């Protein structure tokens, strides 16, 4: 036996759908990263190679999690920047050195004419 009642189509409410779309939009906007990341160029020495245009003045820097040593003398980051003007800076990283500490050093030494920073293995 068939149902003789006429089929009535109910109106679909779009309010819950719009609420979900706005929640998704809010979620993706808050979890997105809008900042751009800068690049820092790193040079690493290779064993047994030497360049003819290397600067004659060299400073040896050992960098650790808490310490910074310039040519055997412990210094702060500000003192290092003041003492190194031109030439080549050879940087040796300790095992516990964080990437942020290395970037802090590079940012302070960046942009000086006649100064090259090289990382040792």
Image (cartoon, rainbow, N blue to C red):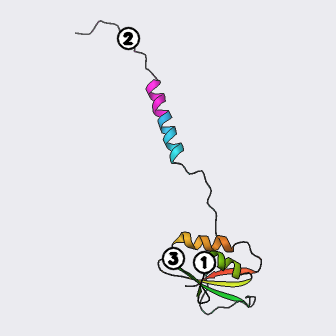
Residue 22 placement, left or right of 119? left
List x then y, in percent, for residue 32.
54, 48
Residue 98 placement, left or right of 10? right
Query: Can residue 25 be seen by looking at this rendering?
Result: yes
Residue that appears at 27% across and 9% down = 3
Residue that appears at 29% across and 6% down = 4
Distance of label 3 from label 1 (alpha carbons): 10 Å
Circle nearer the N terminus (3, 1): 3
Q: Is label 2 or label 3 in front?
A: 3
Circle nearer the N terminus (1, 2): 2
- Region of the chain picked out in magenta, as a range: 1-21
Q: Which residue is mark 2?
A: 8
Please check the rendered image and state whether residue 5 is part of the magenta-colored stretch, yes or no. yes
Query: Can residue 41 be seen by looking at this rendering?
Result: no
List x then y, in percent, for residue 111.
73, 72
List x then y, in percent, for residue 40.
64, 69
Residue 107 placement, left or right of 121? right
Q: Secondary structure at mark 1?
A: loop
Among the 4 quarters of the image, the one containing residue 120:
bottom right
Residue that appears at 50% across and 81% down = 94
Q: Secondary structure at mark 2?
A: loop
Q: Which mark is residue 66?
A: 3
Distance of label 2 from label 3 (alpha carbons): 76 Å
Residue nearer the viewer, 63 or 32: 63
Please check the rendered image and state whether residue 20 is part of the magenta-colored stretch, yes or no. yes
Q: Which mark is residue 76?
A: 1
């Amino acid at each position: 036996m068939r149902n003789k009642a006429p089929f009535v189509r109910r109106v679909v409410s779009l309010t819950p759908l719009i609420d979900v779309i706005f929640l998704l939009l809010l979620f993706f906007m808050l979890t997105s990263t809008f900042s751009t990341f800068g690049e820092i160029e790193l040079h690493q020495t290779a064993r047994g190679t030497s360049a003819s245009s290397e600067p004659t003045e060299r400073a040896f820097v050992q960098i650790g999690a808490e310490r910074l040593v310039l040519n055997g003398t412990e210094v702060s980051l500000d003192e290092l920047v003041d003492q190194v003007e031109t030439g080549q800076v050879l940087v040796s990283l300790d095992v516990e050195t964080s990437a942020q500490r290395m970037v802090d050093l590079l940012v302070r030494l960046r942009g000086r004419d006649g100064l090259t920073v090289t990382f040792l293995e």
